[in-house]
Image (cartoon, grey):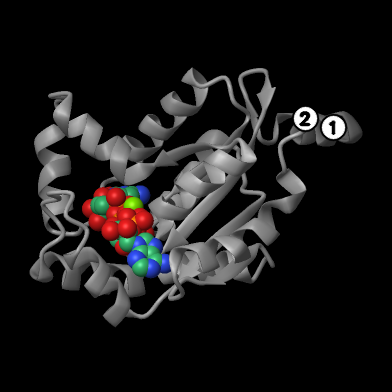
Amino acid sequence: MAETLFFMQVVAENMLGDKKVTVVFVLGGPGSGKGTQCSNIVEHFGFTHLSAGDLLRAEIKSGSENGTMIENMIKEGKIVPSEVTIKLLQQAMIKNENDKFLIDGFPRNEENRAAFENVTKISPAFVLFFNCSEEEMERRLLGRNEGRVDDNIETIRKRFKVFVESSLPVIEYYDAKDKVKKIDAAKPIPEVFEDVKAIFAPYAKAT
Ligand SMILES: Nc1ncnc2c1ncn2[C@@H]1O[C@H](COP(=O)(O)OP(=O)(O)O)[C@@H](O)[C@H]1O
Ligand SMILES: Nc1ccn([C@@H]2O[C@H](COP(=O)(O)OP(=O)(O)O)[C@@H](O)[C@H]2O)c(=O)n1
Ligand SMILES: [Mg+2]
């Protein structure tokens, strides 16, 4: 009986319906280059990129009942309640035929992390952490030019504070489990991608 239970637990892990999925969490401060490098990884390694921030912004645009709440939280640099973000991530993974996902900008706090684990039973293969100074991240965000309501100096300062207080502890949590692959993200885009490539080599597309 005990053996059967153990077996069932192992089988259930990282399953999404009837597919077994590989998930990589892509974390780092605002402007560290998560989205930029995820695009490169998608192209070279066949992952599907799910940006929590992009999904939340799409939810605002869709006119959802949560739209106003999400928009207000983004403007303030605050973290949206996990149930909202997790539902969007889960739906996106189920809808997609791929079994390899980059989850960018999530989990951003302890609540995000624990709720995702409890609800989905998915744990990440590893966590890619883009390490960059605030000075450099601030410069990049102010030059991003995507018309985002949160890329202004006042909100940027709030986002940095949230990152240090709420998101860094999540990275420490995974670091204690030896799951963090830390990248020097202050270098130019192609150089950062060289380091990223070395980490993803085991996931190279079969040719
Ligand atoms: N290594 C880099 N060096 C200089 N600029 C970068 C680098 N990586 C990304 N950028 C630029 O910085 C801005 C923020 O990058 P982005 O990928 O959106 O970061 P994040 O998703 O972590 O907020 C974008 O305008 C992007 O073109
Ligand atoms: N897990 C997440 C991710 C983003 N967000 C919100 O979305 C905003 C933008 O996130 P993002 O990942 O697109 O931002 P960048 O780090 O890419 O600059 C955050 O500042 C939060 O307000 C959230 O609430 N929860
Ligand atoms: Mg981003």
Position of residue 146 measured from the top left corner of the image (x, y, whole percent):
18, 49
Q: How far apart are marks 2 and 1 (CA)?
A: 6 Å
Q: Out of 175 and 99, give the one closest to the viewer.
A: 99
Q: Is residue 108 above or below residue 104?
A: below
Task: Give the image quarter of residue 44.
Answer: top right
Secondary structure type for disc 2: helix
Position of residue 195 measured from the top left corner of the image (x, y, whole percent):
61, 66
Circle 1 residue: 7
Circle 2 residue: 11
Question: Is the residue indicated by label 2 positioned so its CB lies within 8 Å of ligand 2?
Answer: no
Local crowd size for mark 2, using a 10 Å CA cut-off: few (<14), some (14–19), many (≥20) = few
Q: Which amino acid does label 2 sit on?
A: Val
Task: Give the image quarter of residue 139.
Answer: bottom left
Secondary structure type for disc 1: helix
Q: Out of 56 and 42, give the one closest to the viewer.
A: 42
Q: What mark, if any, has residue 136 been given in the picture?
A: none
- Discs 2, 1 touching: Cβ within 8 Å: yes
Q: Which of marks 2 and 1 is in front?
A: 2
Question: Is the residue indicated by label 1 positioned so its CB lies within 8 Å of ligand 2?
Answer: no
Asked whether residue 79 appears in the rendered view, the answer is: no
Q: Which amino acid does label 1 sit on?
A: Phe
Which residue is drawn at the image coordinates 9% and 70% (left, top)?
154
Q: Out of 162 and 41, give the one closest to the viewer.
A: 41
Instruction: Assign the N terminus to one quadrant of the image.
Output: top right
Q: Is residue 69 above or below residue 177?
A: above
Position of residue 162 measured from the top left corner of the image (x, y, whole percent):
28, 68
